[in-house]
Image: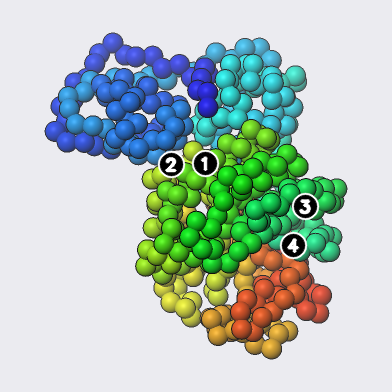
Amino acid sequence: MKKSRIVAVIVALVSVLITVTIVSAFSYQIQWGDTLWGISRRFGTTVDTLVQVNNIPNPNLIFAGQYLQIPDGTVTAVPPTIIPPTVPPGTTTYVVQPGDTLSAIARRFGSTVNAIVQANNLANPNLIFPGQVLIIPVGSGTPVPTATPGPSPTPGPTSTPPPTNFALGGQTLNLAYAANMQYAGMTWAKFQYKWTVGDSPDALASMINAAHNQGFKVLVSVAGATNYPGPGGINFASLVEFLRGVALLGPDAIEVWNEQNIDFEWPAGEISPVSYVNNMLSPAYQAIKQANPNVMVISGALAPTGFDNGYNAWADNRYLAGMWQAGAANYLDCIGAHHNAGATSPTVTVGHPGGTHYSWYFLPTLNLYHNTFAGTRQVCFTELGYLSAEGFPGLPPNFSWAANTTVANQAQWLAEAVTLSRTGGKVRLLVVYNVDYTEFDMSGDPQGGYAIIRPDTTCPACESLHSVMGGGG
């Protein structure tokens, strides 16, 4: 990848140098606008040394909030002074936020990708970073606001307006209930595709086109068709080429695999965040962005679990930390997450029949995923649902924790989760799991119990979501 030069922020070096003697390595938290070259100058080291010490896969990709280990020695620290950029007439400035793309920024300001690339001398339009300051050429000089239903709240001394980039979606079989989804405020439709070697991306074309034609953005989640794959059972090169082809079809987001921390989805004994990042996520990200830079890449959501024997499964907190250490933030636009074992309001952190593990609760799960990546990326819940056995003959034994969850609970808790996500700034996308599944296996997976379209075709959750979303995303 080519290095992206940030020309909107100029760092002036003060004339007085401060000498600091370091007797051991210490940590430095990256700030907005930092580059490895600038940090190396500040602490009297080299870019190559920082790359080696911190195992950085791409020295052109570092993120605000990330911590770097600064090597031992005597260094000369140069405190930077940030000089505001000179803004040419007919332009404005914008600070890149997590999840932003040049195309989305261009649409927001009534500009074009080419105009922004030229104004900022960007070497690679697919590489922009949170905290980067862009000069935006705008014909009228007035940004195009992001549509938000209803009046905007007036910020008080301790309040901030809700983020404008949150979106709500639903995982659906076939869009049979598209009108219900839109009423609930869903602007995204998620489809899961079970891939095997030799599959053609064209199998997804009609699904993507149908959703687009009905006004939805599309998330395609690609996972393996083989349960409990054997040793070496994932053909990474074939998968990457398949994802490249999917990107060419024009979906709005692609989730790269599913629950890769358990042997149901990844070969036992080979479960490894380093393998996932190096063999799958990194090449997939590059292939997708080369084919279609507008596609949001979401890391495969992990199975929320505390079980960890290092062979059949890794606890998601340990696996997630391993992804961060392997440089996953360089190869994703949003952190995939699942929360589908809740049996309490998402506003609470105690009282779940299953116990006290964070995965039973919404906020601890959200905070774990967001904080592990030091706030450099937002979270995308590609599955978030509440299981209710109402209308079904019971529950499989492994799902007994949901025995007391009613359909009314489901509706209320989904609305609360959406409200928390909308106002907290940590969530980019929340996909309700699920809209319209009907299968209910008493000895396995009770998918139908998660559906917001209930067996009698009513949808209480559609009403509760409509009330908090205002009918739009």
Q: Contact (CB < 8 A) between labels 1 and 2? A: yes
Q: Which mark is residue 327?
A: 2
Looking at the image, the residue that sits furthest to the bottom is: 393
At numbered mark 4, what does the secondary structure look like: helix, strand or loop?
Answer: loop
Give the residue at x 57% y 20%.
123
The residue beneath circle 1 is 282
- Mark 3 in CB contact with mark 1 (< 8 angstroms): no
Q: Quarter of the image holding residue 288?
A: top right
Q: Mark 1 or 4 closer to N-term?
A: 4
Residue 245 placement (x, y as % from top left)? 70, 42
Side (left or right) of 110 relative to 96: right
User: Of discs 3 and 2, which sits in the foreground?
Assistant: 3
Amino acid tagged 4: Thr
Q: Nearer the viewer, residue 311 or 402?
A: 311
For the question of whether residue 370 can be seen, the reply is no
Q: Position of residue 430 (x, y in %)?
A: 63, 56
Quadrant of res 144: top right
> Mark 4 to mark 3: distance in Å?
16 Å
* Cα distance between the residues tagged 1 and 2: 9 Å
Q: Please name the amino acid that badge 3 sits on.
A: Ala
Tell me the SS state at disc 3: helix
Q: Is residue 36 above or below residue 280?
A: above
Mark 3, residue position:
203
What separation in Å lies between label 1 and label 4 (alpha carbons)? 28 Å
**C-alpha gap between disc 3 and disc 1:** 24 Å
